[in-house]
Amino acid sequence: MRNFIITVAASSLVLLSGHAAAQAPSDAQIAAIVVTANQVDIDAGKLAEAKGSNAEVKAFGKQMVTDHSGVNKQAVALVTKLKVTPEDNATSKSLKAGGADNIRNLEKLSGAAFDKAYVDHEVAYHQAVLDAVDKTLIPSAQNAELKAMLVAVRPAFVAHLEHAKMLQAALAKKS
């Protein structure tokens, strides 16, 4: 199960690097990727708030909902200002499908198994998102304000990854 969840997280963003090799995503496609990636984490965070058995896991889920909702508000405000309509693309569709698969798998779990699977996914997902931000999204962004927003939110993703890794280690000690 753990390997499946990590595979879903990683494969959700593999399309991005494959797409980047063929053609860099447009700003409209980047906007769709950003909003979708955040929504995937919001949905998983809501589930963790509701189903988590560990107080720290529940709190982390709540933080993911709050932080990623804030990023999405920023992104929507920026694309509205720039008059850019997010363009669904292979990467955003893959993210959406991977997020739905993750939720379906997490819904089958409870207790410590849920907590572990959720946190393992968060570690893999945030690492994959950071790789995509660094290797594809920031370099491909044509609009200076969009690029600046990606650069500005990057430290939050780093902090989320580090927090998830700490939770992962703490949960491993309890096993």
Image (spheres, helix red, strand yellow):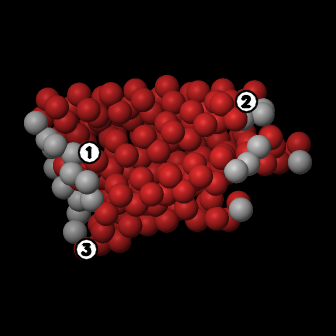
Number of numbered discs: 3
Marks 3 and 1, how far apart in space? Answer: 19 Å
Q: In the rendering, at what x and y percent does residue 15 appear?
A: 38, 67
* Dot placed on the residue nearer the N-terminal end, 3 or 1: 3
For the residue labelled by badge 3, is the local secondary structure a helix, a strand or a loop?
helix
Q: Which mark is residue 52?
A: none
Q: Are marks 3 and 2 in contact (CB under 8 Å)?
A: no
Q: Is residue 56 visible?
A: yes
* Dot placed on the residue nearer the N-terminal end, 3 or 2: 3
For the residue labelled by badge 2, is the local secondary structure a helix, a strand or a loop?
helix
Q: Nearer the viewer, mark 3 or mark 1?
A: 1
Q: Nearer the viewer, residue 106 or 57?
A: 106
The residue that appears at 47% across and 45% down in the rendered structure is: 40
Q: Quadrant of the N terminus?
A: bottom right
Q: Nearer the viewer, mark 3 or mark 2?
A: 2
For the residue labelled by badge 1, is the local secondary structure a helix, a strand or a loop?
helix
Q: Amino acid at mark 2?
A: Glu
Q: Which mark is residue 31?
A: 1
Q: Badge 1: few (under 14), some or many (20 or more) residues near its Cα, within 10 Å?
A: many
* Residue annotated with mark 2: 56
Marks 3 and 2, how far apart in space? Answer: 41 Å
Q: Nearer the viewer, residue 153 or 101?
A: 101
Apparent side of residue 165 relative to residue 82 in the rendered image (left or right):
right
Q: Which mark is residue 22?
A: 3
Q: Is residue 141 visible?
A: no
Q: Badge 2: few (under 14), some or many (20 or more) residues near its Cα, within 10 Å?
A: some
